[in-house]
Amino acid sequence: MIYQILDQSNHAAITELFTSVFTASEGEKEGTLIGKLASELASTIDNDETISVGAFENNTLVGAIFFTRLHFKHAISVYMLAPVAISDEHQGEGIGQALIKSGLNELKKRSVHVAVTYGDPAFYSKVGFQALSENVLQAPQKLSMPFGWLGQSLTYEPIPVINERPMCVKAFNNPVYW
């Protein structure tokens, strides 16, 4: 398996991967929704505000994740991990965890302070994420399931308390994802 930073030239493969994975697991409506989100994110990959890491087998994209910058008035570098997709044929092989670890290592190289995500605590705890109270660090939108807001420090410092709602990339600025 080869893991690498993706760019906009991977747009079609990313969109197809997310649409098919989420359609198979969550149904056509969710597949269309997350496929559209992935397409919007893939079209804005700039390796700064939007970073994507992919897993390739035989030159075929079999997994991908996104990290997008959250902006606070407070001088801190925070990225949000979402969404993640692994092709049906490769689920359960540890590719998702390997992609996340690869992405987190890339963020550490860039001196990012904190990574957050909104998802299944049972899955994300395997790669170091822990429950994160919005009293410590708020999500960009009101959360429908606050127990799914997770974070981890990428430094040796604890996650600082920041009493403001961050700005996120345009693609996530829709309450349907929260």
Image: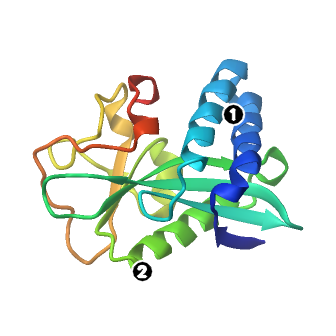
Q: Name, please, the residue furthest toward the right.
A: 58
Above/below status of 160 relative to 122: below
Please, what secondary structure does the residue beneath circle 2 have? helix
Q: Position of residue 4 (x, y in %)?
A: 66, 71
In front of the other: label 1 or label 2?
Answer: 2
Q: How many marks?
A: 2
Nearer to me, 85 or 25: 85
Q: Name, please, the residue furthest toward the top.
A: 29
Q: Position of residue 3 (x, y in %)?
A: 68, 71
Residue at figure coordinates x 63%, y 61% from the top left: 7
Q: Residues within 10 Å of mark 1 (few under 14, many from 20)?
A: many
Q: Which mark is residue 22?
A: 1
Q: Quadrant of residue 166?
A: top left
Q: Quadrant of the N terminus?
A: bottom right
Q: Position of residue 28 (x, y in %)?
A: 72, 21
Please, what secondary structure does the residue beneath circle 1 have? helix
Instruction: Please state which amino acid type lies under the numbered disc 1.
Output: Phe
Q: Residues within 10 Å of mark 2 (few under 14, many from 20)?
A: few
Above/below status of 143 relative to 170: above
Q: Position of residue 73 (x, y in %)?
A: 14, 53
Residue at figure coordinates x 36%, y 25% from the top left: 144
Q: Quadrant of residue 37?
A: top right
Whichever of callouts 1 and 2 sits on the residue coming sooner in the sequence is 1
Q: Quadrant of the C terminus?
A: top left
User: How are the residues colored?
Assistant: rainbow
Residue at mark 2: 109
Residue at figure coordinates x 28%, y 69% from the top left: 113
Residue at figure coordinates x 27%, y 43% from the top left: 167
Q: Which mark is residue 176?
A: none
